[in-house]
Amino acid sequence: MKRDLLALSDFSADEIEALLERAGRMKTGGDAGKCPLIGKSIGLLFEKPSTRTRISFEVGIYQLGGNAVTMNPSELQLGRGESMPDTARTLSRYLDGIMIRTFAHSTLTEFSANAPIPVINGLSDLHHPCQTLADLMTLREKKGRLKGLKVAFVGDGNNVCNSLIEGAALMEFDLTVACPEGFEPDASILERARASAKSEIVVLRDPREAAGMADAVYTDVWVSMGQEQQSADKKGRLRDYQINSRLLSCSKKDAIVLHCLPAHRGEEITDEVIDSPQSVVFDQAENRLHAQKALLELLIT
Ligand code: CP
Ligand code: NVA
């Protein structure tokens, strides 16, 4: 029976714990030279741009001995109107697994329903679970644990925030989201996460209250891919939600700063903060590679 990763909640806490352990061993070179994907081809379909996701998957697949097939809809018959179900049925005859970055989350569920191969969400408008795996790995590396940590997410309650909420519920850390009215995380993801969580997941308005005594402060862009039309309005409404030195001074002295990248410096985060010793954003970006290699090994071999 194939397994997908469409949302982080497709996995149990124990599975995530094991995956993070495995990713850590891969990072330290514990099984360099092992090639679990030898002879296998993994598709990477991008309906939106990507730097980290694309390159970390391509490199990770190469390091595991597999073959990455990167696809752009405009170069496939998809771009001329072939349906997603027919594309899924066809690609499944060649590929051993596929990662898809798309707009509507339903594109992933529809693809998966028509594909007997594992499907990995490389970002949809609703979720970004591969990012959260790297976030969890980074938090654990830097803070030594996940359970009981206090994490603040400041800004737009977007796909990255939704997946982090699922991460908090599964791995038992407290998460406080500070966002303006109208920019809250997805209501049903929040409700489900709160119903299952042993930790506290709170949404409030005041960024200082969220950052107060946090072990980690996280932000993401104010305008996500596909939202460019709302850009001016969103940026205006999120103006008071910037992570700057003043806001960071409310957090613990040893708080780390997370950002999934790409950053819009001077908007959601200042140069001073993202370039400070407290910022771990490039370790976080590196961990995409290790976490996804562990994910590919789990789902595809
Ligand atoms: N964080 C992230 O997913 O980056 P890319 O958009 O560059 O893949
Ligand atoms: N929320 C951002 C994340 C980019 C990695 C977006 O969807 O554009």
Image (tube, rainbow, N blue to C red):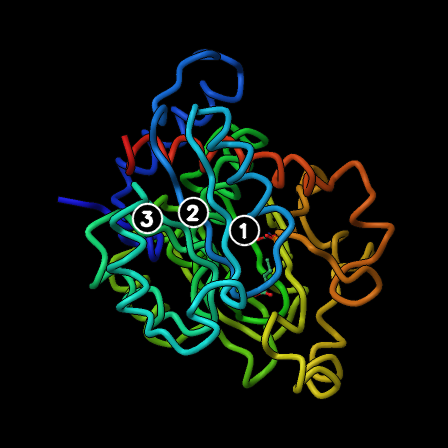
Q: Residue at x 30, y 54 (%)?
A: 9
Q: Estimate the spatial distance between the alpha carbons at disc 2 and disc 1, rounded to whole Å.
A: 7 Å
**Residue that label 1 marks:** 151
Find residue 91 and report its horizontal and vertical position in percent. 32, 54
Q: In this view, does 266 lie above or below 91?
A: below
Q: Which residue is drawn at 45% across and 48% down?
A: 130
Write down the quadrant of residue 219 in the picture: bottom right
| Coordinates of residue 210 in the picture (x, y in percent) | 59, 62
Q: Do the residues labelled 3 and 1 touch (CB within 8 Å)?
A: no
Q: Which mark is residue 173?
A: 2
Q: Is residue 253 left or right of residue 177?
A: right
Depth check, front residue: 191 or 116: 116
User: Where is residue 100 drawn, in percent x and y?
Assistant: 43, 57
Cα–Cα span, label 3 and label 1:
14 Å
Mark 1 residue type: Val
**Dividing the image into 4 quarters, which one contains the N terminus?**
top left
